Image (spheres, rainbow, N blue to C red):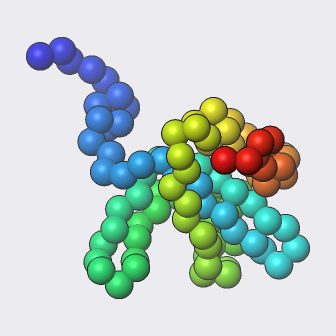
Amino acid sequence: MQEVNIEKALTYIEPGPLVLVTTFDGLRNNVMTISWTMAIDFAQHIVLTTGPWNHSFNTLMEQRECVVCIPPVSMLETVVRIGMVSGTDLSLIHISEPTRPY
């Protein structure tokens, strides 16, 4: 067995796929990458790991509405790019628009 630091170890036990979460605050669309999600029942309730450090958090709390998308593997580079930029600094919707049809 190989010992790894806790940050790396926790990545091995995440229960779900990377997802894209889109929000709309009434003026502007946003999309963010979330790496930890979990279904908590069969009534369409899920848990997302986010907080005030994410640009979309306040919108989620105020609007109480979002769209969760499980992107195909072909979007991996785009999903990673979205996760590395804040929606505070840039409209991430433009990053996520495909350049070719799927």
Q: Residue at x 11, y 16 (%)?
A: 1
Instruction: Indicate left or right for 3 with 43 as reference.
Output: left
Q: Residue at x 61, y 40 (%)?
A: 75
Decide which of 77, 51 is in the foreground and name it. Answer: 77
Q: Quadrant of residue 22?
A: bottom right
Residue 89 higher or lower than 56, as above or below: above
Instruction: Indicate left or right for 40 with 26 as reference.
Output: left
Q: Residue at x 51, y 55 (%)?
A: 70
Q: Quadrant of residue 5?
A: top left
Instruction: Indicate left or right for 26 with 68 as reference.
Output: right
Residue 45 location in percent, x, y? 40, 77
User: What residue occupies the far bottom of the structure in this picture?
Assistant: 43
Residue 73 location in percent, x, y? 52, 39
Residue 12 location in percent, x, y? 29, 35
Does the rendering let one see residue 82? yes
Q: Residue at x 55, y 50 (%)?
A: 71
Does the rendering let one see residue 34? no
User: What residue occupies the far left of the structure in this picture?
Assistant: 1
Residue 17 location in percent, x, y? 42, 49
User: What residue occupies the far right of the structure in this picture?
Assistant: 27
User: What residue occupies the far front of the structure in this picture?
Assistant: 101
All told, the count of numbered labels is: 0
Residue 30 higher or lower than 84, as above or below: below
